[in-house]
Amino acid sequence: MEQLKQRIRKDGQVRNGDVLKVDSFLNHQMDIGLLDEIGAEFQRLFADENITKILTIEASGIAIACMAARHFHVPVVFAKKAKSLNLDGELYTSKVHSFTYDRDYDITVSKKFIQPDDRILIIDDFMANGKAMDGLIDICHQAHAQVVGIGICIEKGFQGGGDRLRKKGYRLESLAIVESMEPGHIVFR
Ligand SMILES: O=P(O)(O)OC[C@H]1O[C@H](OP(=O)(O)OP(=O)(O)O)[C@H](O)[C@@H]1O
Ligand SMILES: O=c1[nH]c(=O)c2nc[nH]c2[nH]1
């Protein structure tokens, strides 16, 4: 998606440890006009998939999933990372290692929100090693729901998570794939 790539070139900052900071427009301060275009692009890409639900993971995926849902007209469910007294009933859980926080945590989704007949589109802001995605896919499998697509805003191609999931047969569409990056120079696939 050219508009997203241009914005990454203009406002993205490359940090040590393979981190691309896009917090001025994507995952801290958010440019809602751009997020709306991103949502529309996901809808164009997955228009034929009869999506019934969008699944994402807190925190950064939520805004993007919601903007996409405005175009698909389906509910959004997000996996929770924090344990909450508010979570009742039966839960699906999976373990995820966070790239940016460098720690493991359990993610949970209430069983009542994913059904075996759901056709799930999983959306997130970043794909790095694919650990968050592995956890979300695991939860869909536990629920016997079908993962019909994965939509990612920015994939860091050099970390391999995206290609690993494509090899497994998932339909993964990333709007921008960073092949390599260093301060002041970002190369897209
Ligand atoms: O492909 P991976 O290696 O799993 O990395 C991608 C994940 O990392 C980030 O989440 P983070 O743990 O930073 O949490 P946040 O959304 O709360 O910032 C991002 O939002 C993805 O969910
Ligand atoms: O803002 C972010 N920048 C990154 O490079 C990254 N990798 C995973 N998650 C990420 N979030």
Image: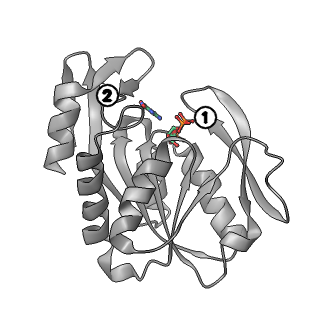
Mark 1 within 8 Å of ligand 1, using the beta carbon: yes
| Residue 24, numbered circle | 2
Residue at x-position 65% and y-position 37%: 97
Q: Amino acid at mark 1?
A: Ser
Foreground residue among 36 and 100: 36
* Residue 156 in the figure: left or right of residue 124: left
What x and y, as percent, mark residue 180? Answer: 28, 30
Residue at x-position 84% and y-position 60%: 88
The residue pinned by badge 1 equals 98
Residue at x-position 18% and y-position 30%: 9
* Foreground disc of the pair 2, 1: 2
- Gap in Å between the C-alphas at discs 2 and 1? 21 Å
What x and y, as percent, mark residue 165? Answer: 48, 56
Q: Amino acid at mark 2?
A: Ser
Q: Residues within 10 Å of mark 2 (few under 14, many from 20)?
A: few
Earlier sequence position, callout 2 versus callout 1: 2
Q: Are marks 2 and 1 in contact (CB under 8 Å)?
A: no
What x and y, as percent, mark residue 26? Answer: 35, 38
Q: Residues within 10 Å of mark 1 (few under 14, many from 20)?
A: some
Classify 45 as above or below 17: below
Circle 1: element type: strand
What x and y, as percent, mark residue 5? Answer: 19, 40
**Residue 172 appears anywhere in the view:** no
Picture quarter with the C terminus? top left
Mark 2 within 8 Å of ligand 2, using the beta carbon: no
* Residue 101 in the figure: left or right of residue 178: right
